[in-house]
Image: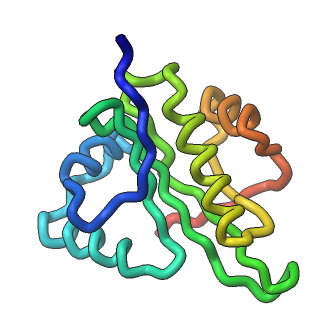
Amino acid sequence: MSTALTIRPATPDDDVDQLFDLLRQLAPDDDRPASEALVAAWRGLHAQPGRELLLAHLGPRLVGTLDTLAVPNLTHGARPFMLVENVVVDRAARRRGVAAALMRAAVDSARSTNCYKIQLVSHQRRVEAHRLYESAGFTPSATGFRRYL
C-alpha cells in the first residue's frame, strides 16, 4: 500500500529545521544560519503578503517544498504575477509525482489570486527540472540574468 501524498501551505508552527534540512538538498553548500536568523526568516516569510510556502508530505514525512510569491503589478490590468522559487523534492521521494503535484498546487494558487503569469528561473544545468517545468506547461521564453550579492 502506498502512502498518500498531501500538499498544503506551511504554517508558522511547522518545523523550520526540518524544512531547512530538505532545502539543503537544493543548495548543499549553503551554510546553516544561526538558529535565531533561521527563525527570524521563517517569521518574515509568514508575515509577507502574497507569500505561500507549499509543503509536500508522504504520510507524516516532509518530502518536498516550493515557495511562491504573488507580486502586485501595475501592468496587465493590474493583475499580479507569481514567482516560484526553491523547488525541491527529497532524493528518496523523487519520481513519485511530488514535484508535479507541487507545481499543480502553485498553478492553482496563481489562478486563485488572479495572477496573469507564473515565472521561475532555473540554472541551465538542471535538465531534469526543466523537463518537469515543461511537463507542467511552462515554456522557456526568456533570457534570465542574476547578480548574486
Q: Which scheme is used to colour this image of the protein?
A: rainbow
Q: Residue furthest front?
A: 1
User: Toward the viewer: 115 or 2?
Assistant: 2
* Residue lying at 19% horizontally and 52% vertically, measured from the top left: 17
Q: In this view, does 82 lie to the left or right of 40?
A: right
Across the whole image, how many numbered discs are drawn on residues? 0
Measured along the vertical axis of the image, is residue 36 above or below residue 28?
A: below
Q: Which residue lies furthest to the top in this view?
A: 1
User: Toward the viewer: 34 or 39?
Assistant: 39
Picture coordinates of residue 57 (x, y %)? 35, 38
Measured along the vertical axis of the image, is residue 2 above or below residue 70?
A: above
Q: Is residue 129 visible?
A: yes
* Residue lying at 65% horizontally and 55% vertically, measured from the top left: 108
Picture coordinates of residue 129 (x, y %)? 61, 34
The N terminus: image quadrant: top left
* Residue lying at 79% horizontally and 88% vertically, measured from the top left: 74
Measured along the vertical axis of the image, is residue 9 above or below residue 80?
A: above
Picture coordinates of residue 75 (x, y %)? 84, 84
* Residue lying at 42% horizontally and 58% vertically, measured from the top left: 9
User: Toward the viewer: 33 or 43?
Assistant: 43
> Based on the displayed image, in which of its 4 quarters is residue 53 positioned?
bottom left
Picture coordinates of residue 28 (x, y %)? 33, 40
> Based on the displayed image, in which of its 4 quarters is residue 135 positioned?
top right
Q: Is residue 34 left or right of residue 23?
A: left
Q: Is residue 26 visible?
A: no
